[in-house]
Each structure stands twice: as C-alpha cells, then as structure tokens.
Image (cartoon, rainbow, N blue to C red):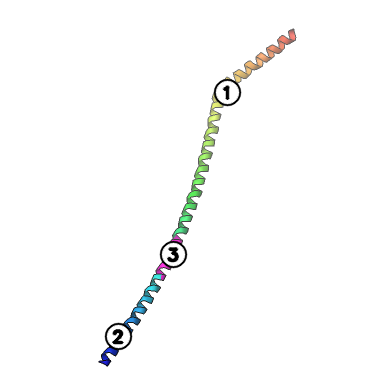
Amino acid sequence: MKQIIKEVFQAEEKVSEILKQARNKASEIRRAVEKENSEKIADAKQKAREIIQTTVEEAKKEAERTRQDKLEQARQEKETLLKSKKETIDNLVDRICKIIINTEHEKDKK
C-alpha cells in the first residue's frame, strides 16, 4: 500500500512538473507572440506614417500645380482681354490726348 501511495505521489509530482513546464512554455510562447505583435504594430505604424507623408507631399505638389495652372490661366485671360480691348483703349487714349491738346490750344488763344 505504501508503495502505491508513493507511486501516486511520484506521479503527482511528475504531473506537477510537467504542468509547470507547460505553463512556462506557454508563457514563453505568449511573450514571443506579444513581442512579434508589438513589432508588427510598430512596422504598420511606420508604414502608415510614410504613406501619410507621401500623400501629404503629393497633395502639396498637386496644390502647387493647380495654383500655377490657375495663375497661368488668369494671365492668359488678362492678355486676351487686353488684346481684345486694345483698339478701344487706343481710341480712348487718342481721344483723351486730343481733348488735352485742344484744351491747351484754347488756353493759349485766350
């Protein structure tokens, strides 16, 4: 009987040791997984930062291109307007000059 009890205790000790080793192994695996997940999250955050930075830079470039296009369009519209009104402006300047000349001549006559 003593032998059976001794064997049962030995078996329980073995089982306890096996369970302890299994818990330790599970703990190691959990730490490794947590570390791996942490590294993956850090990598994902870095990639997200890079994507955001690239997107912002591209948006800035596109905004500058749009700005330049709008400025060029405004310049061309101004040139077109000036060319289309050139004859009118020239006639107006001629009339103003004639009025000034006539006014000066009339002053001289008096």
**Where does label 2 land, which residue?**
11
Q: Nearer the viewer, mark 3 or mark 1?
A: 3
Could you tell me which secondary element the residue under label 2 belongs to?
A: helix
In the image, the segment drawn in magenta is: 31-43
Q: Quadrant of the C terminus?
A: top right
Q: Earlier in the sequence, mark 3 or mark 2?
A: 2
Give the Cα distance between marks 1 and 2: 110 Å
Q: Are marks 3 and 1 in contact (CB under 8 Å)?
A: no
- Give the crowd class for mark 2: few <14, some 14-19, many >=20 residues within 10 Å: few
Depicted 64 relative to depicted 88: above or below: below
Q: Quadrant of residue 25?
A: bottom left
Asked if the magenta segment contains residue 86, the reply would be no
Residue nearest the viewer, comparing 54 with 84? 54
Give the Cα distance between marks 3 and 2: 40 Å
Could you tell me which secondary element the residue under label 3 belongs to?
A: helix
| Residue lying furthest left | 1
Find residue 78 and report its horizontal and vertical position in percent.
55, 29
Residue shown at 63%/17% (left/top)?
94
Mark 3 residue type:
Ser
Find residue 62 and report its horizontal and vertical position in percent.
49, 44
Find residue 11 and report its horizontal and vertical position in percent.
30, 85
**Where does label 3 land, which residue?**
38
Task: Using the image, tell me which numbered label, if any, was put on residue 86.
Answer: 1
